[in-house]
C-alpha cells in the first residue's frame, strides 16, 4: 500500500539496490575500461578533452543546476570558493595541494554553505515524510 512504512522501506531498499548496481558498473566500465582507453589514447586527444570538453560539459550542468534548484546563496558561495581556490590557492601552493583543487572546492563549499545556512528554519516531523 502506498504511504505505509512498509512501502517507504521497500522504496529505500530499491533505491539502495539501484545505487549499488550503478556504483559497481561505474567501477568496472569507467574505472577499469575507461582507464585503459585513456592510457592508449594519444596525449593530444586527452589534452583537448581536459581543456575544452570537460569545462563545456560541467558548465552546462552547472547552468542547469542553478536554474532548477534556485539556491542563489549556495551558488554564490560555490562560485566565490572556486574563484578563491583557482586564483589564490592553486598558484601559491605546491603541486600536491593544487592537484586536489576540485576536491578542495567541494569540501570548502559544503562547509561554508553548512555554517552559513538558515538555522531558524522549522524542522520537519517524521510523520509528514510519509503520505
Image (spheres, rainbow, N blue to C red):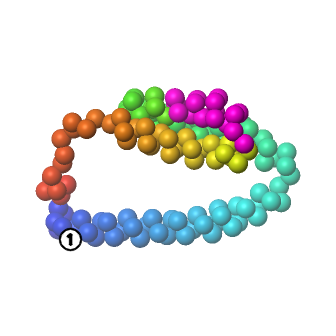
What quarter of the picture does the C terminus occupy? bottom left
Please, what secondary structure does the residue beneath circle 1 have? Answer: helix
Residue 18 belongs to magenta span: no
Q: Is residue 89 magenta?
A: yes
Q: In which quarter of the view is residue 31 placed?
A: bottom right
* Residue picked out by circle 1: 6
Quadrant into which the N terminus falls: bottom left
In this view, the residue in front, 101 or 27, is 101
Q: Which residue is rendered at x = 64% and y = 30% of the image?
A: 88
**Can the viewer see residue 65?**
yes
Residue nearer the viewer, 42 or 126: 126
Dominant secondary structure (helix, strand or loop) of the stretch shown in magenta: helix
Task: Give how far across and how far down residue 47 sits, in percent.
Answer: 79, 43
Q: Nearer the viewer, residue 82 or 6?
A: 82
Would residue 38 be found to the left or right of residue 111 on screen? right
Residue at image position (69%, 39%) is 93
In the rendered image, is residue 131 in sight? no
Point 43% across, 42% down: residue: 111
Residue 63, how many percent across, how many down? 51, 33
The relative height of residue 37 versus residue 67 in the rendered view (above or below) is: below
* Residue numbers of the magenta segment: 79-94
Identify the residue shown where x is 44% and y is 43%.
110
For residue 10, above or below residue 49: below
Q: How many neighbours does mark 1 have within 10 angstroms: few (below 14), some (14-19), or many (20 or more)? A: few
Q: Does 88 sit left or right of 7 as displayed?
A: right
Amino acid at each position: 500500500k502506498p504511504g505505509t512504512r512498509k512501502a517507504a522501506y521497500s522504496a529505500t531498499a530499491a533505491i539502495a539496490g539501484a545505487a549499488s548496481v550503478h556504483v559497481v558498473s561505474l567501477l568496472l566500465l569507467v574505472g577499469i575500461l575507461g582507464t585503459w582507453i585513456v592510457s592508449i589514447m594519444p596525449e593530444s586527444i586527452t589534452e583537448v578533452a581536459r581543456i575544452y570538453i570537460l569545462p563545456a560539459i560541467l558548465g552546462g550542468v552547472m547552468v542547469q543546476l542553478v536554474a532548477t534548484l534556485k539556491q542563489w546563496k549556495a551558488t554564490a558561495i560555490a562560485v566565490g570558493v572556486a574563484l578563491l581556490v583557482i586564483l589564490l590557492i592553486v598558484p601559491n601552493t605546491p603541486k600536491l595541494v593544487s592537484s586536489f583543487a576540485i576536491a578542495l572546492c567541494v569540501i570548502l563549499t559544503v562547509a561554508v554553505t553548512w555554517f552559513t545556512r538558515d538555522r531558524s528554519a522549522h524542522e520537519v516531523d517524521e510523520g509528514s515524510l510519509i503520505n
